[in-house]
Amino acid sequence: MIKKVKIIGAGLAGCEAAYQLSKRGVETELYEMRPKRMTPAHRTGNFAELVCSNSLKSEDVETSSGLLKEELRIMDSLILKCADKTRVPAGSSLSVDREGFSLKVKEELLKRDIKIICEEVKDIDGESIWIVASGPLTSEPLTRSIERLTGKNTLYFFDAAAPIVAADSIDTDNAFFASRYGKGEADDYLNCPMNKEQYSAFYEALVSADCSPVKDFEGSEVFSGCMPVEVMAKRGFDAIRFGPMKPVGLYDKNNVRPYAVVQLRKENREATMYNLVGFQTHLTFGEQKRVFSMIPALKNAEFLRYGVMHRNSFVNAPAILTNTFALKTGERKNIFIAGQLSGVEGYVESAMSGLVASINAANTLMNKPPFILPATTISGALSKYISESDSRYFQPMNGNYGLLPPIEIKDKKLRKSAYAERALNDLKVMLTEGRN
């Protein structure tokens, strides 16, 4: 009989999972290959090393990132506890002393009955309960093991994501619903037309915009399968008009074919978020905001996620994971995938996935019902998104208000306040009822 849980990776998700399991009296083994074997991104062997930034984003509970943090504090998150104790001044954001934060996380784990094993895990056996939180730079041997478990076509090696905008920030007076040549449902795509003058200005801004630097661990193969829109544009003035912005088969509200069109595709069933189809990009976030806001229908767009193109292993979560972060089928339901490998994006989101996966691993061990968070919370909505969105178009996602069931309040500030109030109330009710 299985009596323990093995965790791969001492990043944010893995450390959070180890803490939650230990707190529940579960025998826990935490494996970390660093510093024996390093990744191209990490610089130390520290636990929960913050690679890109020391900021965990806004603390304002009326922002999605602030609400997510408050949800995790209510659920006794180790990562938030350590972040609060090692914070540095950063206005309304939660930023931490990187080294102090990592040391605090490890210190807290060493206080508990957790077996820490500094070695690389190359294969996942089918008998133990595992939480795989090995991150976006998972080693090659472990990657092959994951492929054997989930199928080769369910694991991706590059994150080539287009921007996502909030539906209520789109100027629908400058857009129209239609599918190319009338195929599919009429509202499958929201089309943002441009005349020649608008397109010319947009094109010049796009080809001259600043791109993010390519890190030394990124391969050029990222560009072969999914070319950045700005690279395609540099091939000629009409290149993207014959590519992602082609107007053929589309007619606007006046039955006129536009000069160029940006198509937006629904990112969720509730149609609260839209993806810029074919707009994978390597532009800096600031340039994405500036250039893509030149599209008339997106002049006031709220960007929920900017486009990214970088080395980032992640599974096609909707095809293989439940909202408990467990594998969906067969005898492998005792294997959980958490952190960025599961398709969540961001430090705090990774910690959340580790928390949810570990509570469900413990519940599996103890024959308890699944721990499923309310879809009205950022935590629950993101867990739902990674397990239920369209697997054909899946890309990693951060927590944002576009994931939540809509609240019909026109004033944006009041609406965000209502989102936060509803989320925290629903979470507290669930926890009070003992469903954890």
Image (cartoon, grey):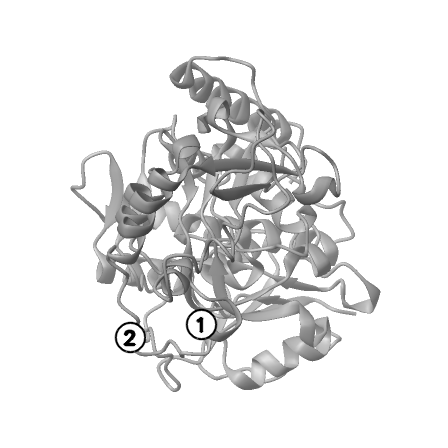
Judging depth in this view, the residue of 253 and 71 nearest the camera is 253
- Please give the name of the residue rendered at 42% of the width and 48% of the height, measured from the top-left corner: 348
How packed mark 1 is, by other alpha carbons closer than 10 Å (few <14, some 14-19, many 20 or more), is some
Q: Residues within 10 Å of mark 2 (few under 14, many from 20)?
A: few
Estimate the x, y position of residue 121 in percent, counting from the top left.
55, 82
Q: Nearer the viewer, residue 335 or 127?
A: 335
Task: Residue 300: name its quadrant.
Answer: top left
User: In the picture shown, does residue 24 fall above or below 222?
Assistant: above
- Could you say which is closer to the camera, residue 414 or residue 376? 414
Residue name at image x 71 percent, y 52 percent? 322
> Which numbered tag is attached to residue 44?
2
Q: Is residue 97 visible?
A: yes
**Residue indicated by mark 1:** 223
For the question of whether residue 124 can be seen, the reply is no
Position of the N terminus, as image quadrant, is: bottom right
**Towards the viewer: 414 or 262:** 262
Cα distance in 3D space between marks 1 and 2? 30 Å
Asked which quadrant contains residue 188, the reply is top right
Tag 1: amino acid: Phe
Q: Position of residue 136 (x, y in %)?
A: 47, 68
Left or right placement of residue 317 versus residue 91 in this view: right
